[in-house]
Amino acid sequence: MLKKKILVVDDEPSISMLIEFNLKLVGFEVYCVFDGEAVFDAIQTFRPDLIVLDLMLPKMDGFQVCRKLRNQNNLVPIIMLTAMQDLTDKIAGLDNGADDYMTKPFSPQELISRIHAIHRRIQTLPSASENTPITIGQISIKADQREVTMNGAPIELTPKEFELLLFLCKHRGKVLSRQQLLHGVWDYHFLGDTRIVDVHISHLRDKIEQNARNPEYIMTIRNVGYKLTEPVVKESLA
C-alpha cells in the first residue's frame, strides 16, 4: 500500500522537524514548506493527501491558503495549527475550509490521531450505497458527488457544512446532542468545544432555511442538541 503523503506548512523549523519526525515514524511520507505561497507549488509536485497548516505564516497566512485552495475546488483535508486560544480564530479557520484545528503546544500523538480520524471519514463518506440522491423537503444531496441543491439550484457548502448536513440527514428525525455531532462529524472522541457545532449549524441554516430564525429543517432541541426534520407542507385554502 502506498504511503499517505502529508504536507507540513510551518515557518518554525523546530516544529516542522518535530512533526516530520513523528509522522515518518508511523509510516507517513512527509514534505515541509515554510510559507503560505509555497503550498501551491507543493500541491502540484508532492500531491499531498492532507495538509498540516500553521495559521501565522509569511507571504500568505493560513486563512488565505485555505480560502484559495477551496476557491480552486481543491478539497485536500487541512488541519490548521494555531497558537491562538480564541475560539473565534479557530472557527474562522474552519469557516475558511480547514477540516480540523489544533492549538499549540500540541501532542504529536494527538496530531497523528486527528490525521487518522480524517482519513477514516474520507474512506466512509460517502459509502457505496449512497449513489442515490438523498431528498428531504426541497433539498437534494448527491453524496458521491458532494453536491447539494435546493429546488434544483446549487447550494455552496464548505466541506464541513456538507458533512454536517449529510450526517443530520442520515439521522433525520433523531435528536442528536452536540457531543454526538462532534463525534460523528469531527470524529472528536473527547470533550471538544461544542460551540463549534452551534456556529456551523447557524451557518448551515443561513444557506438552507428560508428564515434562519424560524427554521423548517434543522430544529433546536433545548438543552439537548439538534434534529433534522421534514418541513411541514402547508395546505392551501380552496
Image (spheres, rainbow, N blue to C red):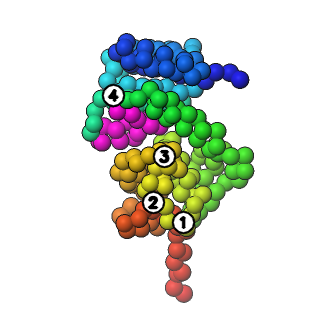
Residue drawn 46% across the image and 49% down it: 182
Q: Quadrant of the N terminus?
A: top right
> Residue 86 lies in what quarter of the image?
top left
Q: What's the residue type where badge 3 is placed?
A: His
Examine the rendered structure and indicate whether residue 104 appears above or below residue 42.
Answer: below
- Residue that numbered label 3 is attached to: 189
Residue at x 64%, y 49% (from the top left corner): 142
Counting from the top left corner in percent of width and height, residue 175 is at 50, 65
The tag on residue 174 is: 1
Q: Residue at x 51, y 41 (%)?
A: 159
Find residue 104 and report its image quarter: top left
Q: Residue at x 33, y 28 (%)?
A: 105
> Between disc 2 and disc 4, whose residue precedes?
4
On the image, the x and y values in percent for residue 190 come to 44, 46
* Residues drawn in magenta: 87-104
The dot on residue 105 is: 4
Disc 4 residue type? Pro
* Residue 110 at x, y percent in the picture: 45, 33
Amino acid beneath label 1: Lys
Q: Kindly state the secondary structure of the residue where label 4 is placed.
A: loop
Of badges 3 and 1, the one in the foreground is: 3
Q: Are marks 2 and 4 in contact (CB under 8 Å)?
A: no
89 in magenta: yes
Between the residue at mark 1 and the residue at mark 4, the CA separation in whole angstroms equals: 37 Å
At mark 2, the secondary structure is: strand
The reply to whether the C-beta atoms of the residues labelled 3 and 1 are less than 8 Å apart is no
Q: Is residue 154 left or right of residue 108?
A: right
